[in-house]
Image (tube, rainbow, N blue to C red):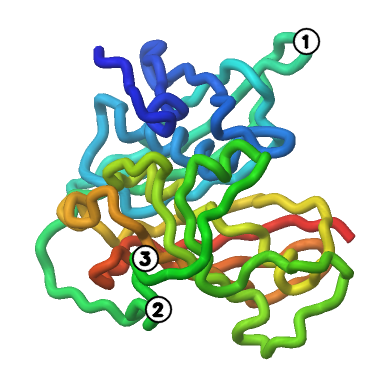
Amino acid sequence: MTTPTHSFDQAITLKALGGDRFEGHTSAPYWNMIGPFGGITAATALHAVLQHPALLGQPVALTVNYAAALGQGPFVVTARAARTNRSTQHWSVELTQDDSHGVPAVVLTGSVVTALRRDTWGINDTPMPDVATPDAALPAPWHSPIEWINRYDVLQLDGPLPKQWDGAASTAGAATASLSRLWMRDNPPRPLDHCSLAALADVFFPRIYLRRALRVPAGTVSMTVYFHADAAAMHATGDGFVLGQARAHGFSAGFHDQSAQLWNTEGSLLATSVQVVYYKE
């Protein structure tokens, strides 16, 4: 078995324990404030399914529910094929980690749908916005003391974080008040696949930070990624930039949603995503 060299592949590495169980370990390069970057955890859950010997086809949908913070150290991912049909397969995924008493505790639940994707008629009803190309983009890349952010090469086009954290609500119209657009890819560049695409869908900061310029505790509770790109589209994207666009639709009683779309530089829609985010007053 070849040892992966890219930090992303190292972070999602899993050791088969037999049956449906795999062992992983948290990765310091993808650390967030109190745990790993949620995107890398989602990618790890998907990776367990993709390396399962019973796998059928390619990913169509991934849903992860973050039940608790993942601490530093080892964890176990259980990926079970709940049902296999002629062309689709439905997976149940659970990530557990021993608590302070050595008792396994659930930190993530999820589901994955895979399928044998066939050549059919298709159309893209969500065209890529008319934005500056990565080569022409003027903003400087993101840099941060938070480790996971430095694992991505990001060029912010629209919707940056506030320059003043004064608690003021955005005065922009509802359609753009929480809108962000950015070019992004792994740092260093890495050929795109379904696992890295799942992680990219979670790169966006919580929309509450844009809608109201106030630093409050916030984190994703549940995220779903729908994969529109098959293996051929992934290959065509290579290690190039992906355009991400995200916005919220409503903020209420401590939760807000987020919808996102991701395209490659040729305008092919690679994935769409929705998530629910907790925020504290």
Q: Amino acid at mark 3?
A: Pro
Q: Which mark is drawn over residue 134?
A: 3
- Between disc 2 and disc 3, the foreground one is 3
Q: Residues within 10 Å of mark 3 (few under 14, many from 20)?
A: many
Residue 255 in which image quadrant: bottom right
Q: Position of residue 39 (x, y in %)?
A: 52, 44
Residue 174 in which image quadrant: bottom right
Q: Amino acid at mark 2?
A: Val
Residue found 43% across the figure and 29% down from its top: 7
Please give the residue where the numbered disc 2 appears in the rendered image: 131
Q: Residues within 10 Å of mark 1 (few under 14, many from 20)?
A: few
Q: Please tell me which residue lies in front, 264 or 140.
A: 140
Question: Residue 197 vs residue 264: left or right?
Answer: right
Cβ–Cβ under 8 Å for marks 2 and 1: no
Residue 131 in which image quadrant: bottom left
Nearest to N terminus: mark 1 or mark 3: 1
Q: CA distance from mark 2 to mark 1?
A: 52 Å
Quadrant containing the C terminus is bottom right
Secondary element under disc 2, as helix, strand or loop, is loop
Q: Position of residue 103 (x, y in %)?
A: 70, 13
Q: Please tell me which residue lies in front, 270 or 27.
A: 27
Q: Position of residue 158 (x, y in %)?
A: 55, 74
Residue found 68% across the figure and 25% down from its top: 71
- Between disc 2 and disc 1, the foreground one is 2
Q: Is residue 26 above or below residue 55?
A: above
Q: Which mark is drawn over residue 101?
A: 1
Secondary element under disc 1, as helix, strand or loop, is loop
- Between disc 1 and disc 3, the foreground one is 3
